[in-house]
């Protein structure tokens, strides 16, 4: 998920496919666990469709996100954004099983992690939320019928949002 988000420490936060969004949008939020989002029950096997390398962006920047297959109750991801031939952002990502559900953990540019709790999952999408975080409050991955991956970050229902589409490499 693209473009720059910022913690209270003003460090960019990238949710993998939203690296560009997170680098363009400047907001403040809190790190740590998602606060009041109602958790959905799931295992990492239910989001195995996310595994692989996904590439998107446009003329101005290349966005790349890679996810390992599920193993040991976790999926590991990395993200990078390349603009003008230079890497301008990176992120370490995890989706881990915890208390019968899933937690998405974003750690952009080596700063402390921010957690988002799974609130919805089905065969083609997964939504993670952290209502106490200023932006994004929601991260959603959707596997589209044409085989592309849609990544959406938003400030909440009906609020500021950005969507990015990525192809499998």
Image (cartoon, rainbow, N blue to C red):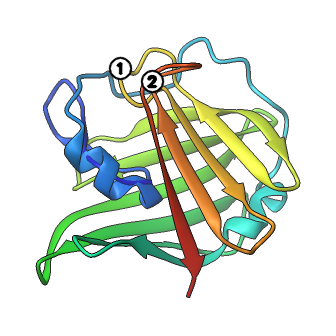
Checking the image for residue 134, the label placed there is 1
The image quarter containing residue 128 is top right
Query: Residue at the front extreme?
Result: 59
Which sits earlier in the primary sequence, circle 1 or circle 2?
A: 1
**Which of 40 and 59 lies nearest the eye of the viewer?**
59
* Quadrant in the picture for the N terminus: bottom left
Picture coordinates of residue 43, whole percent (x, y): 82, 50
Image location of residue 76, percent across then percent down: 54, 65
Task: Tell whether 27 sits left or right of 131.
Answer: left
Image disc number at residue 155: 2
**Snapshot quadrant of residue 79:** bottom left
Q: Residues within 10 Å of mark 2 (few under 14, many from 20)?
A: some
Q: Position of residue 145 (x, y in %)?
A: 81, 67
Residue 121 vs 69, above or below: the answer is above
**Considering the numbered disc 1 on the image, is that residue within a helix, a strand or a loop?**
loop
Q: Position of residue 6 (x, y in %)?
A: 22, 34
In the rendered structure, are the residues bearing label 1 and label 2 in contact, judged by CB atoms less than 8 Å apart? yes
**Point 48% across, 20% down: residue:** 159
């Amino acid at each position: 998920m693209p473009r720059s988000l910022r913690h209270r420490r003003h460090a960019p936060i990238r949710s993998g496919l939203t690296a560009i969004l997170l680098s363009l949008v400047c907001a403040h939020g809190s790190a740590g666990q998602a606060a009041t989002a109602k958790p959905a029950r799931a295992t990492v096997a239910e989001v195995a469709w996310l595994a692989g390398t996904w590439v998107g962006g446009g003329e101005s920047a290349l966005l790349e996100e890679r996810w390992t297959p599920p193993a040991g109750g976790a999926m590991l991801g990395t993200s990078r954004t390349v603009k003008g031939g230079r890497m301008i952002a990176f992120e370490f990502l995890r989706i881990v099983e915890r208390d019968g559900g899933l937690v998405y953990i974003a750690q952009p540019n080596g700063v402390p992690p921010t957690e988002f709790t799974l609130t919805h999952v089905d065969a083609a999408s997964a939504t993670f939320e952290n209502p106490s975080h200023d932006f994004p409050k929601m991260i959603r991955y959707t596997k589209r019928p044409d085989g592309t991956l849609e990544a959406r970050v938003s400030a909440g229902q009906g609020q500021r949002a950005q969507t990015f589409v990525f192809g499998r490499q």
